[in-house]
Amino acid sequence: MKRTLLSLALGTAVSLAGITAASAGTLDDVKAKGFIQCGVSQGLIGFSNPDDKNNWTGLDVDFCRAVAGAVFGDGEKVKFTPLSAKERFTALQSGEIDILSRNTTWTMGRDTSLGLVFAGVTYYDGQGFMVKKSLGVDSALKLDGASVCTQTGTTTELNLADYFRANNMKYEVVAFEKADEVIAAYDSGRCDVFTTDQSGLYAERLKLKNPDENVVLPEIISKEPLGPVVRQGDDAWFNVVKWTYFALLNAEEAGITAANAGDMMANSTDPGIRRLLGVEGDFGKNIGLENNWAANAIKAVGNYGEMFDRNVGPDTNLKISRGVNALWKDGGIQYAPPVR
């Protein structure tokens, strides 16, 4: 019995030591190298897209800049690794990147079997279909026998199979690894239909030779909660990424912007705002950062609403309304726990 108890005690100590080491890992590594390595798409307008000088913009890009702001006080201390859908999880598992911020759907399988964990939902989406207007189709239920272009290694393929099976329709898959290959095949007429997340359809339509000759059908066939991903067992880094996301939502709710965050720190008497911006409490120290971590994240990219409007909102080429991505108080489902 004594030997068993000793073995259990030693095993527990080893396990705890392992957890402690894992918890310290990525945050310490990021601080040591001086930047965050962020995995993004290979080019999706509004979410993560490079210009001809390799300057990256988009909602997913801005989120990584926000994390860099929280960690370093400088949103520019981030480097971007473009990844295909097939490559993205391996890159994170292997440590090639520190965070995956690449229009990636949160599913049970990914959350439990890949050694990864999702830190939140930065964009609530759903899968849709795009067709050429000349096809004369106004509903996905009229796509029986269609050839469908899609990307390999995504939930899109599985949703497609489920939808056509449930509606007793036949289809032919035309699949590619890279997103640009998919849209090029659709544009050249190799398939009748292009399917991906609806936000992606609006983004990819801008790349077509004649965007206005294509229409996104009304059906949404799935739930696609998209958000940043980190490795499991690294709680310190998970907390930084998760609470950066929550800070951006709380900032919008409180009316804190990139432009007024400094004034709010100096002049606000609201206890919630003072805690969020680090004027009161030691909440930054609790996650291994300076107490003004949230203020620095907000100064880097603005609040969640500013990020959304700048990258995908009604005044951009994508012209996407907030919809379910509005704050809870405005009829949406974006909601964050408080800093207290």
Image: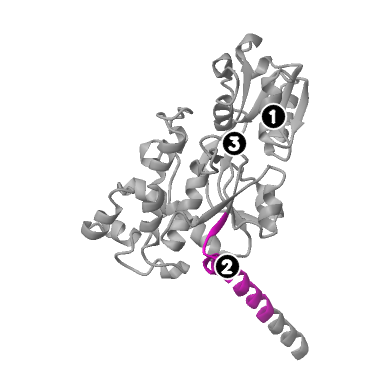
Three-letter amino acid code at disc 2?
A: Asp
* Kind of residue indicated by mark 1: Val
Between residue 189 and residue 102, name the one nearer to us: 189
Q: Are marks 3 and 1 in contact (CB under 8 Å)?
A: no
Judge whether 14 appears above or below 212 on screen. below
- Name the quadrant containing residue 151: top right
Callout 2: 10 Å neighbours few (<14), some, many (20+)?
few
Classify residue 126 as left or right of residue 10. Answer: left
Q: Which colour scheme is used?
A: one colour
Res. 146 visible in picture: yes
| Badge number at residue 223 | 3
Q: Position of residue 303 (x, y in %)?
A: 38, 47
Residue behind mark 2: 29
Q: Which amino acid does label 3 sit on?
A: Lys
| N-term-proximal mark, 1 vs 2 | 2
Q: Give the range drawn in magenta.
A: 12-37
